[in-house]
Amino acid sequence: MAAVKVTALLLLCLDLICCSGRALASSSSLKFAVLGDWGGLPDFPYRTLVETAVASQLGKVTQQFGSQFNLALGDNFYFDGVKNVDDPRFKETFESVFTSESLQNPWYFLAGNHDHNGNVSGEIAYSAVSHRWNFPNFYYNLTFRIPGTSLTVDIVMIDTVILCGNTDSDFSQKPLRGPSDVDDAEKQWDWIGKTLQASNADYLLVAGHYPVWSVAEHGPTQCLVDRLMPLLMQNHATAYLCGHDHNLQHFEYGLTGYNIDYFVVGAANFIDGSLAHESSVPTGSLKYHWANKLGMGGFGLVEASAYNMTFTFVEATGKVLYTRVMPLRKMKGNPV
């Protein structure tokens, strides 16, 4: 019953945002936005129409939804990242685009393949320049308390390019090269395993750039299927969030009776309708797919309460596309 109530509240909030500009978002929940692959263009006007539309709608929705922060899932600057901390792209593609008052709250970043074409350390260093840009390291852990409760949400931010290697190009369709530094990759794998095992959070999210599962242009990332998915299941993660493919997707899949939710949220700058890897994902695992160019992009909203976690895809037009409700982790006696 609680799950139904929370979902209904979220949908009511979003309907009111779209229709009347008013919302009834709960004050006893943690709320945040998720977007990936938002990184504009290297030349004037330094942004796409999709990025501009997403930024505008994201500002409207987050103002009424009352979100506390934003997760950005990589490919922050197309096509070759930034040169250094003083690169004008920070202003041209981020600061001058996501201008809404509601988007001046904290942003948490991770790197995508295009960022690794440039200087990711420059993006990390920009954390000391911008009050809202938070990128402390290539991989790191975040913990948030759900307001009005003793419950917590852990978000483990990982660098999938260090783990699995970079791509030759977005169009080559060649397998990932493998990690450029095996020792660095193994160090991060060790950190991921220990961080997930140590988490006592009531909701546990892992966020990276490459997808575990995808039916689109890039398809599943075998490196993550082989090594990350077992860690997610062993540690009863709530969900995995990613970008890389330029659309919105939701998968539910697991082994040994425990399913993980996988969300692809990569439609904040380009939209790609490819279904090239429909046959490469487990049968029945795909629950939702969106790649409507008329929708001008999309993003995700997450609300975590004492009862459940709700993930909602929202189109840049303001249309609520899809909602998924997930229970508290199956641990510490939590009900499921």
Image (cartoon, grey):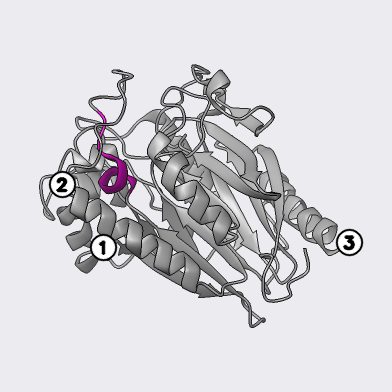
Q: Nearer the viewer, residue 52 or 140?
A: 140
Local crowd size for mark 1, using a 10 Å CA cut-off: few (<14), some (14–19), many (≥20): some
Q: Nearer the viewer, residue 10 or 227?
A: 227
The amino acid type, in three-letter code, at marker 1 is Asn
Label located before the other in sequence (1 or 3): 3
Distance CA(mark 1)–CA(mark 3): 41 Å
Q: Which mark is residue 1?
A: 3
Q: Nearer the viewer, residue 38 or 56?
A: 38
Identify the residue position indicated by label 2 in the image: 88
Identify the residue position indicated by label 1 in the image: 137
Kindly give the residue lying farthest to the front in the view shown.
256
Q: In this picture, which residue range is highlighted in magenta?
A: 160-167
The amino acid type, in three-letter code, at marker 2 is Pro
Label located before the other in sequence (2 or 1): 2
Magenta stretch: includes residue 234: no
**At numbered mark 3, what does the secondary structure look like: helix, strand or loop?**
loop
Q: Is residue 195 left or right of residue 310?
A: left
Residue 250, image quadrant: top right
Label located before the other in sequence (3 or 2): 3
Residue occupying the point 67% across, 81% down: 149
Quarter containing the C terminus: bottom right
Local crowd size for mark 2, using a 10 Å CA cut-off: few (<14), some (14–19), many (≥20): few
Q: Which mark is residue 306?
A: none
The amino acid type, in three-letter code, at marker 3 is Met
Looking at the image, can residue 95 be seen?
yes
Where residue 194 sits in the image (x, y, percent)?
Answer: 41, 68
Where residue 95 sits in the image (x, y, percent)?
Answer: 30, 52
Where residue 272 sits in the image (x, y, percent)?
Answer: 46, 22
Looking at the image, can residue 318 be seen?
no
